[in-house]
Image (cartoon, rainbow, N blue to C red):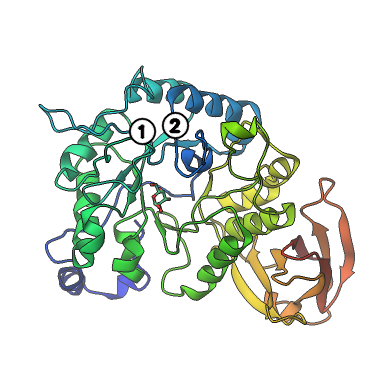
Amino acid sequence: MPPPPGHHHFSHLACLLLAFLLLPGTAAGLDNGMGRRPPLGWNTWKTCGEATCGHDVCNEREVKAVAEAMLGNGMAALGYDFVNLDDCWASPDRDPNTSALTWDAARFPSGIPSLIDWLHARGLKFGLYTSAGNQTCSSGGRPRPIPGSRGHYAVDAKTFAAWNVDYVKFDWCGDIKKQVLKGKQAHVDFARAMNASGRAMFLEVVAGYFFFWSDIATVANSWRFCTDHHDEWKSTNVEITCRIDQTHKSEGAPGGWPFMDMLLTGGQGCSPLSKGAHCPGQTDDEYRTAFAVWSLSQSPLIVATDVRKMTAVMNQTLLNKDLVELHQSTATPPGKHLAYWECAEPLMCEVWGRKIVANGTSWMVALVNHGKKVHNITVEWKELGFADGEAATVVDVWDAQRRVVDSNAKVSFSARVPSHGSAVVRITKL
Ligand code: GLA
């Protein structure tokens, strides 16, 4: 973990005292060297295999098929290298001798360690899910509840380490959900168990932000700070608004990244009853907007839809080289909401942006339309720190040819943006 801002101004003693006050009984935070860049990958949660698509069903054949798709469709080459199992992999029974979690043998007949070896041999990384409480959030259609990690943090962290897991998602379900006062200590305890496991593993927490606010980077490499993301515009809109509202720690830095939850670009998987049809819950414009805001603000890009069925919009957005490369760059701070733009509707439009280079001469800007109608949205030079009259070129980043849409913009740039859509442009001073 990087030291918190201002860290160097504290004396060592003051730091220790502060740590003692904030985290009784703990040493330093999760200093595991992981997450120097925000992770990219896939998660099983919305690639639904059952009739109602209400919960996750994963199995070894599906996971390998998805991994092969990622290796073949350009995702892995662009850096999407995490293959993460959500709440779908464990069996209802711990090992009676070691108390270790065990995998669902019907879903994973060759076992999780052998699946991990298979992925590692192909240059991919692997993530697993567990919960802070005594049960996970969903039994995944199984008749008995799935155990969470409560009371077993050390053994679970050691088991994940022994299997060579690379990423752990630490959810907030089971008995602990009603014991909010235990939340902070549970996160500290699990982070310490991860540190003591003998293997550096990336740690995503779902609820930790609510217990730590600005200190969350001391216990996790990424943290959710809003509700679950679902495949509908209302939910995408909530995530974007949340990002603007959560000022405490909505900016990531190497080692720790605020997570806007999974990306649903292209639509969640359909039930087998829909016979292979694709089921998008949002328009292509809405998926592009989500990707623009997630990538500019450097949220982890964990896709949860079925990447075996890449639609045109999935190809255009998930594989957008400029946006993914900028997402992985740590040359400048994460992008953010720069300004509101008054659209003639109850909902405001927004300007999001990120410096591409530290001296601020080049920016990636997203003009986001939250309204129901088409709007002209403008970014003004003062929002980018440019002087009025300074000339810049503007390139359309959604356009496959990256065409110049204005070769001599001065003072501002405006684009016509469809409802819930976004214009994403690179603006560079001449
Ligand atoms: C919670 C989490 C989701 C998912 C499910 C699994 O709702 O927020 O991301 O992991 O549990 O049951």
Q: CA distance from mark 2 to mark 1?
A: 7 Å
Q: Is residue 321 left or right of residue 429?
A: left
The structure residue drawn at horizontal position 12% and vertical position 29%, both measured from the top left corner, is: 98
The structure residue drawn at horizontal position 81% and vertical position 58%, both measured from the top left corner, is: 395
Q: Position of residue 337 (x, y in %)?
A: 60, 72
Identify residue type, mark 2: Cys
Image quarter in which the N terminus is found? bottom left
Asked if the residue at label 2 sits under 8 Å from ligand 1, the reply is no
**Dot 2: few (<14), some (14–19), or many (≥20) neighbours within 10 Å?**
many
Asked which quadrant contains residue 85, the reply is top left
**Residue 184 visible in the current orientation:** no
Tell me the SS state at disc 1: loop
Q: Is residue 185 left or right of residue 322?
A: left
Is 6 rendered above or below residue 295? Answer: below
Q: Is residue 292 left or right of residue 221?
A: right
Front in this rendered view, residue 356 or 273: 273
Q: Which mark is residue 227?
A: none
Q: Position of residue 326 (x, y in %)?
A: 62, 53
* Number of numbered discs: 2
Q: Earlier in the sequence, mark 2 or mark 1?
A: 2
Residue to which mark 2 is pinned: 58
Asked whether the residues under the numbered discs 2 and 1 touch, taking CB atoms below 8 Å apart as contact, a structural biologist would say: yes
Front in this rendered view, residue 24 or 113: 113
**Dot 1: few (<14), some (14–19), or many (≥20) neighbours within 10 Å?**
many
Identify residue type, mark 1: Trp
Q: Position of residue 185 (x, y in %)?
A: 19, 61
Tell me the SS state at disc 2: loop
Residue to which mark 1 is pinned: 89
The structure residue drawn at horizontal position 35% and vertical position 73%, both measured from the top left corner, is: 6
